[in-house]
């Protein structure tokens, strides 16, 4: 077994991303589950998919510097990548709120962990 075999379940291919504007608008038009925290809002729509799919929106209005927007997107992708096997099969759109650029990486990661858990609980109870 090679080292790459160990990580095959933790990839982020195109099949687990929302790629088109239509994918995003489908979620916005029919939100089934909504969870939020101080710095993030997650909108989810149930679909019969083999796995969860992620879309990320970090508006320039909320995070001025491109470096900070890219950092937030990297953290989101990494958090999703590590948790995608345990998440329900939904289309997810994560929106970053104002002030996300002022928190450090560990705080951002813990807030995302909290939101993934909250999302899973909310879907199980529905």
Image (cartoon, rainbow, N blue to C red):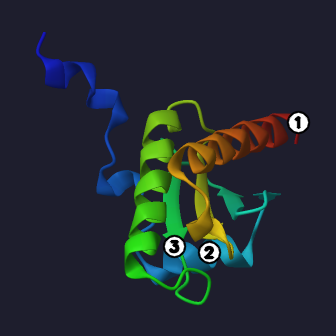
* Disc 2/disc 3 C-alpha distance (Å): 5 Å
x, y (%) of residue 57? 54, 74
Q: Which mark is residue 7?
A: none
Q: Nearer the viewer, residue 82 or 23?
A: 82
Residue 19 in which image quadrant:
bottom left
**In this figure, which residue is indicated by the disc labeled 2?**
26
Residue located farthest toward the left when viewing the structure as drawn: 2
**In this figure, which residue is indicated by the disc labeled 1?**
125
Residue plotted at (55% across, 43% down):
106
Residue located farthest toward the right when viewing the structure as drawn: 125
Q: For the residues labelled 2 and 3, say whether their Cβ atoms are less than 8 Å apart.
A: yes
From the viewer's perspective, is residue 61 above or below residue 106? below
Q: Secondary structure at mark 3?
A: helix
Position of 33 with respect to 19 (left or right) is right
Residue 2 in which image quadrant:
top left
Quadrant the N terminus occupies: top left
Position of 107 with respect to 74 (left or right) is right
**In this figure, which residue is indicated by the disc labeled 3?**
23
Residue plotted at (68% across, 76% down):
98
Q: Nearer the viewer, residue 70 or 83?
A: 70
Position of 35 with respect to 116 (left or right) is right
x, y (%) of residue 63? 55, 80
x, y (%) of residue 59? 55, 83
């Amino acid at each position: 077994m090679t080292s790459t075999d160990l990580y095959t379940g933790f990839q982020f291919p195109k099949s687990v991303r929302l790629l088109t504007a239509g994918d995003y608008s489908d979620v916005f038009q029919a939100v089934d589950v909504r969870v939020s925290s101080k710095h993030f809002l997650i909108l989810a729509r149930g679909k019969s998919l083999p796995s969860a799919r992620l879309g990320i929106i970090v508006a320039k209005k909320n995070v001025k510097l491109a470096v900070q927007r890219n950092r937030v997107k990297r953290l989101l992708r990494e958090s999703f990548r590590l948790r995608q096997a345990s998440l329900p099969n939904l289309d997810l759109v994560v929106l970053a709120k104002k002030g996300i650029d002022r928190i450090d990486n560990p705080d951002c990661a813990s807030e995302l962990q909290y939101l993934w858990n909250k999302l899973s609980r909310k879907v199980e109870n529905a």
